Image (tube, rainbow, N blue to C red):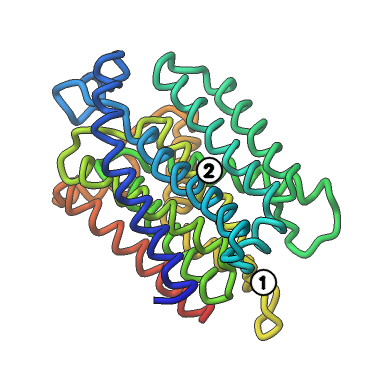
């Protein structure tokens, strides 16, 4: 194999194996420290489940990245470095640091929410702060409008929308993690097709880490993502949807806007539906209920595992369509 195929495979398999190996260690730590989801109201489990998924997924992403940076440094010293990746780091180094810092911040915010059930206003403020830090590192949406204030506002709105959409979709075993893997994989395919090596590699790291967690979460769960994990998944998808260059002179500018919306259509439309229904009932949008697509499918006779698999298939079809349209 040659570059970039070996790089992509190393990213996907490395993050998968590290997440897979890290989960039992984090699960044992969570059980020992009481960081578990106890049975109770609207819960589908009858015994405490470790909230280890977010920590394992973050481990599966950070360790390969750190190893890659160290190997790249050694390669530069020996003359065997990859110029394409060096160029990517030179161009996006600050962005990458901000993204990783934001990922850690989202995990901490979600962990605090798992432990202490933060007020919605506190959690929202934390999300806005992290999104602003990422936008300040020039990870921003412009929508082809040359205005900094507009760019900041749209970027923060987008990141918050995706974070909360994935957080709301974390309502059945495997659902949030599977949607995250499908979304990251789809975005990675588009980045690879456009020759964006660093972005494609980062997408595959996220995809692999989520796939490494899934065996512990679907169909039966011995670990949950928790708010730490769902915040991480939503944040990474929101940011990864900004990084690739979807624009091409062959297509209208609106196509660049449509692509990430198509890839993330399932969680975004589900959130829009749920928020609308709660607003109609005079219920705060952040108060949980059973009006999600997954719940309605179960009410119509699907098992929970079947409902999750069907929603994965729908999201996968959206992702395939987006990749095909960007071929």
Mark 2 highlights which residue?
A: 235
Residue 284 - label: none
Residue found at the very far right of the displayed protein:
147
Report if residue 295 is visible in the image. Answer: no
* Whether residue 33 is situated above or below residue 135 in the rendered picture: above
* The one of 165 and 239 positioned closer to us in this rendering: 239
* The one of 272 and 21 positioned closer to us in this rendering: 21
* The one of 160 and 184 positioned closer to us in this rendering: 184
Residue 254 - label: 1
Where residue 85 sits: x, y (%)? 60, 63
Residue depicted at x 75% and y 58%: 142
Where residue 178 sits: x, y (%)? 32, 52
Question: Which dot, 2 or 1, sits closer to the camera?
Answer: 2
Element assignment for label 2: helix
Task: Please give left or right for residue 128 compared with residue 179 in the image.
Answer: right
Where residue 233 sits: x, y (%)? 45, 44
Q: Residues within 10 Å of mark 1 (few under 14, many from 20)?
A: few
Q: Quadrant of residue 60?
A: top left
Could you tell which of marks 2 and 1 lies nearer the N-terminus?
2
Task: Please give left or right for residue 265 compared with residue 80 in the image.
Answer: left
Where residue 221 sits: x, y (%)? 19, 37
* Whether residue 186 is situated above or below residue 21 in the rendered picture: below
């Amino acid at each position: 194999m040659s570059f970039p195929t070996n790089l992509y495979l190393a990213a996907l398999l490395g993050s998968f194996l590290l997440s897979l190996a890290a989960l039992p260690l984090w699960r044992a730590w969570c059980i020992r420290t009481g960081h578990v989801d106890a049975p109770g109201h609207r819960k589908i489990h009858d015994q405490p489940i470790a909230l280890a998924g977010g920590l394992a997924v973050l481990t599966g992403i950070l360790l390969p990245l750190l190893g890659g940076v160290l190997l790249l440094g050694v390669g530069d010293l020996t003359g065997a470095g990859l110029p394409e990746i060096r160029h990517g780091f030179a161009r996006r180094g600050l962005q990458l640091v901000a993204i990783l810092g934001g990922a850690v911040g989202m995990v901490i915010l979600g962990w605090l929410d798992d432990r202490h059930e933060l007020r919605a206003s506190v959690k929202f403020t934390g999300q806005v702060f992290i999104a602003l830090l990422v936008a300040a590192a020039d990870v921003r949406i412009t929508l082809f409008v040359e205005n900094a204030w507009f760019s900041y506002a749209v970027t923060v709105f987008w990141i918050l929308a995706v974070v909360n959409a994935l957080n709301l979709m974390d309502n059945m075993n495997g659902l949030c993690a599977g949607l995250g893997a499908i979304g990251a994989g789809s975005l990675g395919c588009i980045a690879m097709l456009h020759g964006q090596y660093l972005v494609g590699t980062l997408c595959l790291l996220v995809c692999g880490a989520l796939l490494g967690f899934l065996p512990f979460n679907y169909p039966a769960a011995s670990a949950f993502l928790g708010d730490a994990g769902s915040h991480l998944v939503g944040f990474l998808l929101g940011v990864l949807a900004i990084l690739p260059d979807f624009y091409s002179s062959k297509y209208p500018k609106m196509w660049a806007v449509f692509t990430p919306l198509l890839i993330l259509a399932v969680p975004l439309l589900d959130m829009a539906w749920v928020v609308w229904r709660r607003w109609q009932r005079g219920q705060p949008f952040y108060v949980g209920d059973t009006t999600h697509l997954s719940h309605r499918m179960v009410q119509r006779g699907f098992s929970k595992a079947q409902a999750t698999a069907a929603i994965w298939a729908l999201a996968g079809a959206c992702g395939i369509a987006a990749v095909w349209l960007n071929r």
